[in-house]
Image: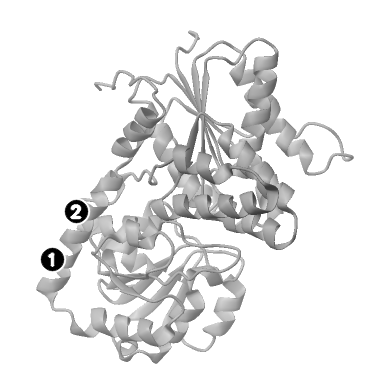
């Protein structure tokens, strides 16, 4: 095998984890193959470790394969039982050290600051101490939970050292990236709080250095869907076109599933459409119990990557009523953009977090945590919108969503990192 000339490494919670970053990693990796990278690697966690963590996971047999040229690595833990969690981080760090010291020019992108960016920074520090690693460019991408779940919680609990360490790790990278303008503002404001406690100057540096890179989406997987394939997918599920509202995301309170169930049961439109809740997550059992006895509410926990756009296309409306909670804030809304691309019914969502950036002015928006307002919005899209209005809304939504195409996002990200553009594939 010939020696690679250009490498992209993405450190992430990859498939089968149900997480926006797993899709981002796949899409960046796929585009990299067309941009001159002949060695593309996703470095992630062993499947048993993901299962033991209790993360929401897709069925293993439902995951679409990666293109030839993309290698998914799941380093085994290093050490014995006396180093419990750290064994897996050391496995990641040691593999990254090997990739950083073999002389291949490398771009490394980490998603989630802890522990992924910690592993990258530590591996690169070791590589450079050995005299290698100087042809490695790193970028760290922060999401809202990095800030809300670590920085803000640490400050509230009087553990400012953890918050300061996280920001130090973030700023140690060549590129510091936020998933949305909302997230960038959140980072700067949180850094200002750390500065007040620790006497640091993180906020000024974050304001100067943090850029925005929206999630890259494979738009081709959602447009120009085969109507026959859509009808067949719906028939397998016992569904009809425009005969159901669709929620498809992690099933958590922060996604507003409880509000959606309450709003649906209070709506007049429930006599015309069913409610399909697709996904899995920590509150799935709780939401099933909340909907118990209502045979018009359907739960699906086995939707594949291939089936997802088909269900979106056939829905009367796609509903994601996210609401901010201490453990999670919706910093973008990837599923909303995917639904907008699919050409299905209108998108109904809330104005929380970075959602307005993902939908522009193309969605029916309500305040977060308002079941009554949500019920009214459901009735509006189910009972009041004329067919011509629905078609026009779908076209506007798709046009807006195309700005998040993965090729455009990849090229802008590399431009911000000052990485020379590679030769695009001609095949």
Q: Residue furthest right?
A: 82
Residue 404 image offset from top left, x and y in percent: 30, 46
Near-viewer residue (207 or 218): 207
Secondary structure at numbered mark 1: helix
Direction from residue 417 to residue 313 in the image, left or right? left
Residue 232 found in image quarter: bottom left
Q: Is residue 416 above or below residue 310?
A: above
Taking the spot 49% from the left edge, 46% from the top edge, the residue there is 21
Query: Tag count in the figure?
Result: 2
Residue 74 image offset from top left, x and y in percent: 63, 34
Taking the spot 48% from the left edge, 13% from the top edge, the residue there is 4
How is colour applied across the structure in the image?
Answer: one colour
Direction from residue 345 to residue 49 in the image, left or right? right
Secondary structure at numbered mark 2: helix
Give the distance between the C-alpha atoms of the residues marked 2 and 1, in whole angstroms. 11 Å
Q: Which label's residue is closer to the chain start, 2 or 1?
A: 1
Q: Mark 2 near mark 1, Cβ–Cβ under 8 Å?
A: no
Residue 348 image offset from top left, x and y in percent: 32, 72
Q: Which part of the image, by quadrant, shows the C terminus?
A: top left
**In this orientation, does residue 269 appear?**
yes
**In this orientation, does residue 112 appear?**
no
Direction from residue 230 to residue 3 in the image, left or right? right
Direction from residue 379 to residue 192 in the image, left or right? right
Disc sitting over residue 392 in the figure: 1
Near-viewer residue (235 or 115): 115
Near-viewer residue (291 or 4): 4
Residue 14 found in image quarter: top right
Crowd band around label 2 with a 10 angstrom C-alpha radius: few (<14), some (14–19), many (20+): few
Q: Which residue lies under the disc numbered 2? A: 399
Residue 178 image offset from top left, x and y in percent: 46, 45
């Amino acid at each position: 095998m010939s020696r690679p000339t250009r490498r992209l490494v993405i450190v992430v919670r990859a498939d089968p984890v149900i997480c926006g970053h797993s899709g981002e990693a796949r899409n960046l990796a796929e585009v990299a193959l067309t941009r001159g990278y002949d060695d593309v690697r996703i470095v992630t966690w062993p499947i048993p470790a993901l299962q033991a963590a209790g993360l929401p996971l897709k069925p293993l047999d439902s995951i679409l394969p990666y293109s030839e040229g993309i290698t998914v690595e799941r380093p085994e833990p290093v050490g014995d039982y006396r180093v419990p969690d750290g064994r897996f981080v050391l496995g990641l760090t040691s593999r990254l050290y090997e990739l950083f010291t073999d002389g291949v020019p490398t771009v490394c992108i980490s998603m989630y600051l802890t522990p992924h960016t910690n592993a990258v920074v530590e591996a690169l520090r070791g590589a450079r101490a050995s005299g290698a690693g100087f042809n490695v460019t790193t970028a760290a991408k922060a999401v809202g939970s990095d800030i809300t779940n670590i920085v803000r919680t640490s400050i509230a609990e009087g553990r400012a050292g953890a918050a300061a360490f996280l920001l130090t790790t973030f700023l140690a990278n060549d590129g510091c990236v936020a998933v949305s303008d909302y997230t960038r503002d959140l980072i700067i404001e949180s850094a200002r709080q750390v500065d007040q406690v620790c006497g640091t100057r993180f906020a000024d540096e974050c304001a100067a250095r943090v850029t925005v890179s929206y999630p890259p989406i494979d738009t081709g997987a959602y447009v120009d869907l085969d109507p026959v394939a859509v009808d067949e997918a719906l028939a397998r599920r016992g569904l009809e076109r425009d005969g159901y509202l669709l929620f498809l995301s992690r099933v958590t309170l922060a996604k507003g599933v409880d509000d959606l169930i309450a709003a649906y049961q209070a709506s007049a439109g429930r006599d015309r459409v069913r409610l399909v809740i697709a996904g899995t997550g920590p509150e799935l059992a709780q939401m099933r119990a909340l909907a118990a006895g209502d045979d018009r509410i359907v739960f699906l926990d086995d939707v594949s990557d291939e089936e997802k756009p088909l269900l979106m296309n056939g829905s009367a409306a796609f509903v994601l009523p996210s609401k901010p909670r201490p453990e999670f804030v919706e910093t973008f809304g990837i599923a909303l953009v995917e639904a907008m691309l699919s050409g299905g019914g209108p998108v109904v969502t809330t104005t929380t977090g970075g959602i307005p950036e993902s939908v522009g002015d193309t969605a029916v928006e309500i305040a977060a945590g308002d079941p009554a307002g949500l019920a009214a919005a459901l009735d509006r899209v189910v009972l009041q919108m004329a067919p011509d209005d629905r078609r026009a809304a779908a076209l506007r939504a798709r046009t807006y969503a195309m700005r998040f195409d993965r090729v455009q996002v990849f090229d802008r990200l590399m431009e911000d990192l000052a990485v020379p553009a590679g030769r695009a594939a001609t095949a």
